[in-house]
Image (cartoon, rainbow, N blue to C red):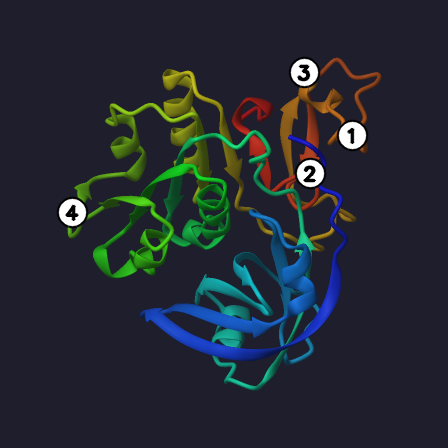
Amino acid sequence: MPPDQSQASVHRAAITDRTELAKGVILLGIHAPELVRVTKPGHFLLAIPPSGERCATALGIYEAQAERASILFFVCGSRTRELADLAVSEYLEVAGPLGNGFDLSGQPKNVAIVAGGVGIASVLLPAQRVAEYGGRVQLYYGARTQALLVDAEKFERYGCVLNLATDDGSSGFDGYVTELLAQTEEVPDLILACGPTPMLHAAAKVASRMRVRAQLSLEETFACGVGACWGCVVPISRASAQAPRFPMLSTDGSRSDSVYARVCKEGPVFWADELRW
């Protein structure tokens, strides 16, 4: 996975549209042409609350087209509630794009995308990119219940084949989405996944059994979001740390087989075989 050289900046963006896709699930569109111009699949942004509180919220960039970007999020606390309460024509400060995204430079033809819950917010852009170069996407999308399977029709517009799963059996496969992935007879060229950590663990195991490489977009709580505080680290193998995309990681003088990478800087996307779970 080559290092991502994009430069983040702060944008004052007007809210262009707001949709409540399900109870507590908000899609917020913003006018941010400069952000859109440099956004790549898998990037995220920091949304700075209008109240002026400087502790920003990290959110995956859902859409980035023309002059409009969007974020899709679940309301789960005071900061996301403040974002959800914004009205069209109000302004929001965002910093981005940030992080290292998905690597589709090899243009794999058959891609399986696995999304769990709010993880759907980070996988529309890679699905679009695969469609642009003529590839095919099988989307494995899971949620707790049918009402939380949001915006799936948008993926169908890009030719994605939908494979839905719910924990309670209210729609699609009755069980975890990774169990559905494990049952497929069509082995993909590449697996991309975003969702809760247990789901990513399971997706990595399925990929290993299939002998297919997987890229995982990790969910983590960020204090700074720009790699300064080292508060969001995950262990990666010492061999992986030698790769050019990890120039800041020290690998000298330690007997440990692991070194630590920052999810907000070297990630959020990692190859599954780089991680030491």
Q: Earlier in the sequence, mark 4 or mark 2?
A: 4
Q: CA distance from mark 1 to mark 2?
A: 10 Å
x%, y% of residue 189? 43, 25
User: In the depicted view, which residue is nearer to us: 161 or 47?
Assistant: 161
Q: Which residue is mark 2?
A: 266
Circle 1 crowding by C-alpha within 10 Å: few under 14, some 14–19, many from 20? some
Looking at the rendered structure, the kind of residue marked 3 is Asp
**Mark closer to the chain start, 3 or 1:** 1
What residue is drawn where x is 64% and y is 30%? Answer: 1
Residue at numbered disc 4: 169
Q: Secondary structure at mark 3?
A: loop
Residue mark closest to the camera, 1 vs 2: 2
Mark 1: which secondary structure? loop
For the residues labelled 3 and 1, say whether their Cβ atoms are less than 8 Å apart.
no
How far is the residue under mark 4 from the one under mark 1? 44 Å
Judge left or right: residue 170 versus residue 74. Answer: left
Between 135 and 64, the one nearer to me in the picture: 135
Give amino acid for label 2.
Glu
Sequence order check, earlier mark of 3 and 4: 4
Q: Give the mark nearest the N terminus, 1 or 2.
A: 1
Q: Is residue 42 above or below residue 177?
A: below
Tag 4–tag 2 contact (CB < 8 Å): no
Q: Position of residue 221 (x, y in %)?
A: 59, 51
Quickly name the residue at label 3: 257
Disc 2 is placed on an element classified as loop
Type of amino acid under label 4: Gly
